[in-house]
Image (tube, grey):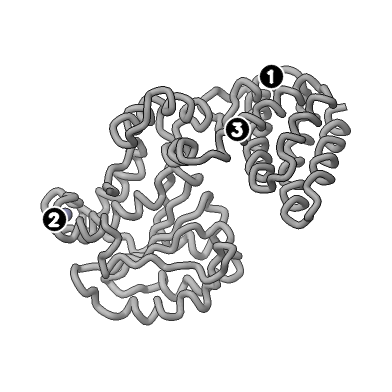
């Protein structure tokens, strides 16, 4: 059963709660933050805050709250993207929404529209959003989410309030997972070691067979890269053969490990790290120069595209290794 509970993220929570409590209803809200950090939970909380009519809204117990938590409240409308890639064709996907927004809510005082995960939707098509967030009817609230605010047109951002969600501390994460997910202490610890204070990512880590494997391979690759051993790097990449999904996941984790190494070289603290293998990032930062590290950072994105587009994974993996060796010298 879902709940309205938001762990950490007091700034975002206080900002939006105090606006609503003071009767200043935000008609457009953008929530930004990496996958797993609770953007949709915050959106659900905002809907609860607006629609629950109890004193301590969202109370979590009344009929309205139960409908919201169960996913069946008629005034909380999740807009679905029409493209398989997860991108919205906004012009089409919003056509019905714009006219629906002018019809009064069926249960409560507001209609809340959630348009989630906008990362893949081209900015050029976002003008279609303006119809919804420019001079909206008093009863409508539109919530948009993406992993970063840069995914939105400036004209969209200028008409909304922007809230950010961040990872919580490892202690807060451990406390939440211990009471809510029914996993053993060991499972929770290994999830937190790999995923840090990203609660959603920790839950995926424990649910997935691929993710823990990808974390292990990505860490081993990063350690071999720091040791500049071509043979070992090759052996690690070969563990990904025949499994495109694993290879792509591994590259996206490597991209974070490389980025963290750059952050460490710049003297940033451990709190600024986002990757799943802080020890490997520290090794890279120790062994490679700034120039080599920044060249390394280009690798994951470059080969993600070629792995998606190319049917021969083995050739791609060999090419990645050759490219890495060229860049680290
Ligand atoms: Zn309630």
Tell me which residue sits at (82%, 22%) in the image: 229
Instruction: Name the residue carrying label 1.
Output: 283
Neighbour tally class for label 1: few under 14, some 14-19, many 20 plus, Cα within 10 Å: some
Q: Nearer the viewer, residue 296 or 153?
A: 296
- Describe the element under mark 3 as helix, strand or loop: helix
Confirm if mark 2 falls within 8 A of ligand 1: yes
| Discs 3/2, front | 3
Q: Most extreme residue toward the front, as rendered?
A: 242
Q: Most extreme residue toward the left, as rendered?
A: 55
Instruction: Name the residue carrying label 2.
Output: 62
Earlier in the chain: of badge 3 and badge 2, it is 2
Left or right: residue 144 versus residue 240 is left
| Percent x, y of residue 281 | 65, 25
Where does ligand 1 appear, by image quarter?
bottom left
Instruction: Name the residue carrying label 3.
Output: 215
- Describe the element under mark 1 as helix, strand or loop: helix
Tell me which residue sits at (84%, 39%) in the image: 318
| Percent x, y of residue 323 | 85, 38
| Percent x, y of residue 263 | 63, 29
């Amino acid at each position: 059963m879902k709940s309205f509970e938001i762990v950490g993220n007091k700034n975002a929570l206080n900002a939006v709660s105090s606006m609503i409590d003071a009767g200043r209803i935000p008609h457009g809200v953008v929530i930004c933050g990496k996958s797993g950090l609770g953007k949709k939970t915050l959106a659900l909380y905002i809907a609860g805050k607006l629609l629950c009519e109890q004193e301590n809204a969202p109370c979590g117990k009344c009929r309205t709250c139960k409908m919201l938590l169960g996913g069946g409240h008629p005034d909380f409308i999740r807009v679905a993207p029409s493209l398989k890639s997860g991108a919205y064709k906004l012009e089409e996907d919003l056509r019905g929404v714009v006219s629906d927004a002018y019809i009064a809510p069926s249960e409560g005082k507001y209609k809340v529209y959630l348009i989630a995960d906008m990362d893949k939707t081209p900015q050029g098509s976002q003008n279609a959003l303006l119809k919804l967030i420019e001079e909206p009817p008093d009863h409508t609230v539109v919530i948009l989410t993406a992993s970063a605010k840069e995914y939105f047109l400036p004209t969209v951002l200028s008409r909304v309030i922007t809230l950010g969600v961040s990872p919580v501390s490892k202690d807060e994460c451990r406390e939440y997972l211990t009471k809510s997910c029914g996993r053993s202490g060991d499972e929770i610890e290994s999830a937190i070691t790999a995923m840090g204070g990203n609660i959603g990512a920790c839950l995926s880590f424990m649910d997935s067979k691929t993710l823990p494997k990808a974390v292990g391979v990505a860490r081993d690759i990063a350690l071999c890269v720091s040791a500049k051993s071509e043979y070992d790097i090759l052996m690690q990449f070969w563990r990904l053969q025949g499994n495109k999904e694993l290879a792509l996941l591994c590259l996206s984790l490597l991209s974070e490990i490389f980025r963290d190494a750059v952050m460490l070289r710049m003297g940033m603290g451990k709190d600024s790290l986002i990757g799943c293998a802080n020890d490997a990032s520290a090794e890279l930062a120790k062994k490679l120069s700034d120039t080599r590290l920044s060249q390394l950072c280009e690798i994951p994105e470059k080969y993600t595209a070629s792995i998606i587009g190319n049917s021969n994974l083995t050739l791609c993996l060999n090419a990645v290794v050759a490219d890495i060796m060229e860049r680290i010298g």
